[in-house]
Amino acid sequence: MEILLKSWKGAEEDAFLVRQEVFIREQGVPAELELDEFDPTAVHAIAHQDAQCVGTGRLVDLGNGKAQIGRMAVLAKFRGKGVGKQILQKLVELAASQGAQEIILHSQVDAIPFYEKLGFTAEGASYDEAGIPHRNMILTLANSTQ
């Protein structure tokens, strides 16, 4: 398994194929909501196994010591094998190296236990995002390199 960090230009084809399969086909997210204004400026993590992209996620620098992880997706047949964990860890490491002190994400309610195992804490009430229940989650980075 290899996790690469790329700009949107370098990640778009692979990332979109995974996001299309997971979010649009599997979960029914409207196609027009899948790509947004953050993709061009985000750093994208792409997980490759045997020359196939099997997972993706992105990191958006929000400024003021804050970053947001989003668009985490792993193809169904690769779930439960540590792919998502490796993508998330790579993005957390990147955020820390960029001086982030806090990372936020919008977790699907069903995925909260996955993020909690990696140190994130759920905050606030659940809300609807693209027809799927979500909650905000936060990770405070103790050893920021700012």
Image: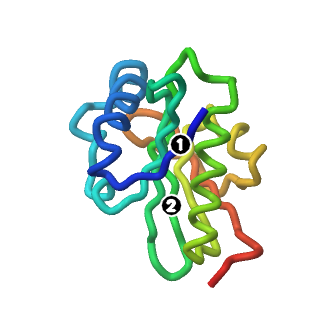
Judging by the rendered image, the residue that carries numbered circle 1 is 134
**Mark 1: few, some, or many residues within 10 Å (few <14, many ≥20)?**
many
Where 111 falls versus 43 (above or below)? above
Say which residue appears at 31% left-offset and 51% top-offset.
8
Where 26 falls versus 82 (above or below)? above
Residue 46 has which mark? Answer: none
**Mark 2: few, some, or many residues within 10 Å (few <14, many ≥20)?**
many
- Whether residue 35 sits left or right of residue 44 in the image: it is left
Q: Could you tell me which secondary element the residue under label 1 belongs to?
A: strand
Q: Residue furthest left?
A: 32
Where 92 falls versus 99 (above or below)? above
Judging by the rendered image, the residue that carries numbered circle 2 is 68
Q: Residue furthest front?
A: 51
Looking at marks 2 and 1 on the same chain, the residue that comes earlier in the sequence is marked by: 2
Q: Amino acid at mark 2?
A: Gln
Q: Could you tell me which secondary element the residue under label 2 belongs to?
A: strand
Give residue 137's position: percent from left, percent from top: 63, 54
